[in-house]
Image (cartoon, grey):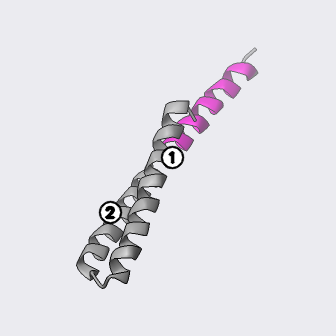
Amino acid sequence: MSQRAHERAAELHNLAAHAHAAAAVAHGKEDHLTAHELSKQAHEHSMNVHKLTQELSQKTTQSQGAEAATQKAP
């Protein structure tokens, strides 16, 4: 995973964690509407990082496969 992609994934993880924490605080204050919105944001961030990680994994697998094929060629 490139450094930039790794940084982006870490940023999305941090955003999701922050939204979860803020949702918990809002829920504790019985502000359920805000808590629900923050939970939705946290879920979106989590899904985005999951998608990014899958894409990066796929690219890595493809490049490793191409490299292995090149090395096996006579």
How many discs mark residues in the rendered view? 2
Left or right placement of residue 7 versus residue 35 in this view? right
Name the residue: 35% across, 60% down.
Answer: 44
Q: In this view, does 58 lie to the left or right of 35?
A: right
User: Visible in this render: residue 52?
Assistant: no
Question: How far across and how far down the image is residue 68, in percent?
Answer: 70, 27
Q: Does the magenta stretch include residue 67?
A: yes
**Disc 1 on helix, strand or loop?**
helix
Q: Which quadrant of the view contains residue 26?
A: bottom left
Label drawn at residue 41:
2
**Does 2 sit left or right of 38 as displayed?**
right
Q: Mark 1 points at which residue?
A: 10
Residue 57, horizontal then vertical, whole percent: 56, 43
At label 1, the amino acid type is Ala
Q: Is residue 11 above or below residue 74?
A: below
Mark 2 falls on what kind of element? Answer: helix
Q: What stretch of residues is rendered in magenta? A: 54-71
Q: Which residue is drawn at 39% across and 56% down?
A: 45
Q: Is residue 63 visible?
A: yes
Q: Which residue is drawn at 66% across and 24% down?
A: 67
